[in-house]
Image: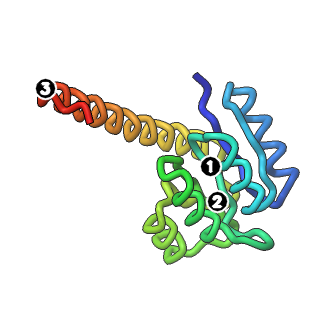
Amino acid sequence: MKIRVLLVDDEKDFIDALAERLEVRRFEVMKAFSGDEALALLREHDTDVVVLDMLMPGKDGMQTLREIKEMRPLAEVILLTGHGTPGKGVDSIQTGAFQYMTKPASLKDLLENILNAYKRKSEQEERIRRADIRRIELSLKDGDLG
């Protein structure tokens, strides 16, 4: 199964180049050039990891992050910024981001973060599946069909 990544940045050349590098490595990549475009794509498509620019015209990265986590709580988000501060990094993690990286980020570091974010999402999904199975097993044991 391919890891599904959504790239969100208003810099088209950056997104196109990064998408090409990820696709060569067998990632399934979608691209959005604004927060609203990213949210529209997420309404229609599931994704594992979102790589999200912090500063974009219109809806900024933090607002987009909040809306992504409301819509797709298990999707992991890596925030990228060219204007990072420690305070923004802490705020983004507290808001639900998996990682906060400053540009220019090395492809190696970004790939590592995408893989780790995917691993965390997969582990969370597995815990949910096990809890669902356990709940069903308990209801069968108790004879509860409703």
Q: Is residue 101 left or right of residue 6?
A: left
Q: Which residue is mark 3?
A: 141
Quadrant position of residue 55:
bottom right
Q: Amino acid at mark 3?
A: Lys
Q: Position of residue 61 (x, y in %)?
A: 65, 67
In the rendered view, would you say 71 is above or below 57? above
Q: Position of residue 63 (x, y in %)?
A: 62, 70
Q: Residue at x 45, y 41 (%)?
A: 121
Q: Disc 2 or disc 3, which is closer to the eye? A: 3
Residue 80 image label = 2
Q: Earlier in the sequence, mark 1 or mark 3?
A: 1
Q: Position of residue 46 (x, y in %)?
A: 61, 40
Q: Is residue 105 left or right of residue 21?
A: left
Q: Where does the C terminus fall, quadrant-wise?
A: top left
Name the outermost residue toward the front: 146
Q: Mark 1 to mark 2: distance in Å? A: 10 Å
Q: Which residue is mark 1?
A: 50
Q: Mark 2 to mark 3: distance in Å? A: 49 Å
